[in-house]
């Protein structure tokens, strides 16, 4: 399962998730969660709506999750953090294999968002290791406007990330 932290139609992060999905073996299905924009603000007293149930069910059904996020104001976008907050007490991410990517047009590669995301995922109990994450700087120079990879040197680190996630999934089965 893939979750993009960006709501933009032509987001570099969503494009990266699609590229990652194409690096997976043929026998692995990959679905992007496309309802992030419909999730209401987190309030533990509120009843869960259909979109929240869909999110939780998709996470529960997935053998692994890849989250790819931009960095906004040195952190993850509010919509992504909000969605993750809905899973705090229900445990969908507990021991769930995780890969995390941040991509930014800046030289920093969204490193602060990635650090924040990894901290949140630790709190949620996701299964991760030292090579489960990747920061991609200068993303605009690595993708075409249509979302095609223009910098072949990015393929190797993406493949390492994918292979690590698949290994983590195999170890958890």
Image (cartoon, helix red, strand yellow):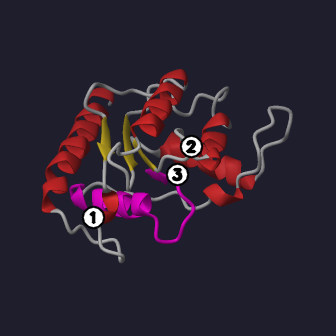
Find the distance from the CA under tag 3 to the CA under tag 2: 14 Å
Find the distance from the CA under tag 1 to the CA under tag 2: 21 Å
Q: Secondary structure at mark 1?
A: helix
Q: Nearer the viewer, residue 94 or 121?
A: 121
Q: Closer to the N terminus: mark 1 or mark 2?
A: 2
Badge count: 3
Residue located at (46% from left, 71% from top):
10
- Start-end of magenta stretch: 1-26
Q: Nearer the viewer, residue 156 or 44?
A: 156
From this view, report whether residue 137 is shown above or below residue 122: below
From this view, report whether residue 68 is shown above or below residue 7: above
Residue 73 tag number: 2
Q: Position of residue 57 (x, y in %)?
A: 59, 46
Q: Nearer the viewer, residue 165 or 114?
A: 114
Please tell me how crowded label 2 is: few (under 14), some (14-19), or many (20+) other residues with Cα within 10 Å: few
Q: Closer to the N terminus: mark 3 or mark 2?
A: 3
Please tell me how crowded label 1 is: few (under 14), some (14-19), or many (20+) other residues with Cα within 10 Å: few
Find the distance from the CA under tag 3 to the CA under tag 1: 20 Å
From this view, report whether residue 102 is shown above or below residue 164: below
Residue located at (68% from left, 37% from top):
86
According to the image, label 1 marks what residue? 141
Q: Is residue 21 magenta?
A: yes
Q: Position of residue 7 (x, y in %)?
A: 57, 61
According to the image, label 3 marks what residue? 5
Q: Position of residue 16 (x, y in %)?
A: 34, 59
Mark 3 against mark 2, which lies toward the viewer? 2
Mark 3 against mark 1, which lies toward the viewer? 1
């Amino acid at each position: 399962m893939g979750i993009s932290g960006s709501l933009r139609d032509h987001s570099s992060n969503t494009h990266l998730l699609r590229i990652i999905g194409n690096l997976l073996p043929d026998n692995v299905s990959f679905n992007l969660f496309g309802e992030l924009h419909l999730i209401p603000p987190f309030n533990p007293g509120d009843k869960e709506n259909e979109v929240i149930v869909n999110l939780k069910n998709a996470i529960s059904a997935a053998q692994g999750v890849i989250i790819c996020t931009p960095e906004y104001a040195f952190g993850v976008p509010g919509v992504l953090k909000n969605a993750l907050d809905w899973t705090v007490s229900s445990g969908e991410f507990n021991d769930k294999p995780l890969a995390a990517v941040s991509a930014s047009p800046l030289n920093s590669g969204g490193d602060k968002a990635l650090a924040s995301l990894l901290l949140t995922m630790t709190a949620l109990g996701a299964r991760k290791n030292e090579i489960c994450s990747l920061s991609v700087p200068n993303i605009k120079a690595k993708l075409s406007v249509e979302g095609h990879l223009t910098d072949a040197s990015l393929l190797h680190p993406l493949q390492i990330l994918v292979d690590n996630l698949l290994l983590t999934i195999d170890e958890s089965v």
